[in-house]
Image (tube, grey):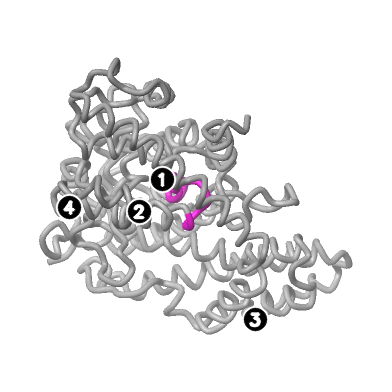
């Protein structure tokens, strides 16, 4: 069994019948990019932690700028891969699809790759998970089904992102942004639900609530089934992953230098280690900041070329769902990337300021979860009668923009709480916490 490019590149939109025509002027995948970039969930990424919460320099990247950079790199990766794939497979690959369309699919998927992340980055994910494993959260999910429990025990930004784009970003709650199945399938880094999650990483790509939408995407795009609720990745997903890896590996060095946490010599040395050859023009640059920016640009270009080479060398395995690992790990630069990852973790990430922010973020998120879940639980116990609630509980329910009715299933109102909180920016979450505690 092998996946077919003709289905993998489907321009059919989620919830629609029949593919949208691919026209040279503005193809469906460009429209996908536009729909993501104009949605409110994407705009909120401007105030969500990438690495540095509320950094002291406005140069440092947040999740919005990171997502735009990843999308730019992804477009290049997709277009280069697409050119060779079309040469190999001809028009049988996909009627009307050119190399640029490959790039647009990857760019749109990259743009949304962090759209489901909660405030305070991956620490926010871990905090939500922990709250449902102990204390009030554990008691609330005790009566849910196994898959529904795991959705909260292993709360995942990737699954939340799929929920955002396929359900929440639409006033009718019907297909979300209505993206093409090619883009949505490419977006799914983990094409399986929480019950089929990786036993080590506990990563998964959709909640139980979106199982039917997930099934529609996998069926339309022709993803290869590997077991119950588990599918092979869309081939272009490897390019999304590579674009993300390229960006954070390289720009963390640049950001660390700009923040003064690493020296110029350290930044230069690590970036040079990723270059196949240092261009002669580098000697013409005198300013240290411009030197690092120049090296960063050249390293990204080299890593794009290497990732494309690995993808094309392993295209057959990828289409058969037999490729393991990520593209960059197969390149000659893998040892240098591992060394950089260890260096940045120690010198840039593990700082006193970051730990202080995590303490603050943990207090904020656990307080918000407790307050809003208590209000919903009170409404559930009161049989949906808001008049029976404490005034504070009624006020909390009114703060939520899309609170379920009193007769909603517990699973649904718990999701509404995690939807609300994970959609907050860092600043808004802090503001809500301060109001909750009477500090504003």
Query: Which quarter of the rendering shows the N terminus?
Result: bottom left
- On whether residue 117 falls in the magenta region, the answer is yes
Image coordinates for residue 138, horizontal then vertical, percent:
27, 52
Viewer-proximal residue among 137 and 32: 137
User: Mainly helix, strand or loop, the magenta region?
Assistant: loop
Mark with earlier residue (2, 1): 1
| On screen, residue 207 above or below 358 | above
| On screen, residue 81 above or below 164 | below
Which stretch appears magenta? 110-123
Spatial distance from mark 2 to mark 1, Cα to Cα?
Answer: 8 Å
Tell me the residue at 39%/51% (across/down): 128
Which residue carries the number 1 mark? 116
Which residue carries the number 2 mark? 156
Image coordinates for residue 293, horizontal then vertical, percent:
73, 62
For the residue labelled by badge 4, is the local secondary structure a helix, a strand or a loop? helix
Which residue carries the number 4 mark? 147
For the residue labelled by badge 1, is the local secondary structure a helix, a strand or a loop? loop
Tell me the residue at 75%/60% (across/down): 259
For the residue labelled by badge 3, is the local secondary structure a helix, a strand or a loop? loop
């Amino acid at each position: 069994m092998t996946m077919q490019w003709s289905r993998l590149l489907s321009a059919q939109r989620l919830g629609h019948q029949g593919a949208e025509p691919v026209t040279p002027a503005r193809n469906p995948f460009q429209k996908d990019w536009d729909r993501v970039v104009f949605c409110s969930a994407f705009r909120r990424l401007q105030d969500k932690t990438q690495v540095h919460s509320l950094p002291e320099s406005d140069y440092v990247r947040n999740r919005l700028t990171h997502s735009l950079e990843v999308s730019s790199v992804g477009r290049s990766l997709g277009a280069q891969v697409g050119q060779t794939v079309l040469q190999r497979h001809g028009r049988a690959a996909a009627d009307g699809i050119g190399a640029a369309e490959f790039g647009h699919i990857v760019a749109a998927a990259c743009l949304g790759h962090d759209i489901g992340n909660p405030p305070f980055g991956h620490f926010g994910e871990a905090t939500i998970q922990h709250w449902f494993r102990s204390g009030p959260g554990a008691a609330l999910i005790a009566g849910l089904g196994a898959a529904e429990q795991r959705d909260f025990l292993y709360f995942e930004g990737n699954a939340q992102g799929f929920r955002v784009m396929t359900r929440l970003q639409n006033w009718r709650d019907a297909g979300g942004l209505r993206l093409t199945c090619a883009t949505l399938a490419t977006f799914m880094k983990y094409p399986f639900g929480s019950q089929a999650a990786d036993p080590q990483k506990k990563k998964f790509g959709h909640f139980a609530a979106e199982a039917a939408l997930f099934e529609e995407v996998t069926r339309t795009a022709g993803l290869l089934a590997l077991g119950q609720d588990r599918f092979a990745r869309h081939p272009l997903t490897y390019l999304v992953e590579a674009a993300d890896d390229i960006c954070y590996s390289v720009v963390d060095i640049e950001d660390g230098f700009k923040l003064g946490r690493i020296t110029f010599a350290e930044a230069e040395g690590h970036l040079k280690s990723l270059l196949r050859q240092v261009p002669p023009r580098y000697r013409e640059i005198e300013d240290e900041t411009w030197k690092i920016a120049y090296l960063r640009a050249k390293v990204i270009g080299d890593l794009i070329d290497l990732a494309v080479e690995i993808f094309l060398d392993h295209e057959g395995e990828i289409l058969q769902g037999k490729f393991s690992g990520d593209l960059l790990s197969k390149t000659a630069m893998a040892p240098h990337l591992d060394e950089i990852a260890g260096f940045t973790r120690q010198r840039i990430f593990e700082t006193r300021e970051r730990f202080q922010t995590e303490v603050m973020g943990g207090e904020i998120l656990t307080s918000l979860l407790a307050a809003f879940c208590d209000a919903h639980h009170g409404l559930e116990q009161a049989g949906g009668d808001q008049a029976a609630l404490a005034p504070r509980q009624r006020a909390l329910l009114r703060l939520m923009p899309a609170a379920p009715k009193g007769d909603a299933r517990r699973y649904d109102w718990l999701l509404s709480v995690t939807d609300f909180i994970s959609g907050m920016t860092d600043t808004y979450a802090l503001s809500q916490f301060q109001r909750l505690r009477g500090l504003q």
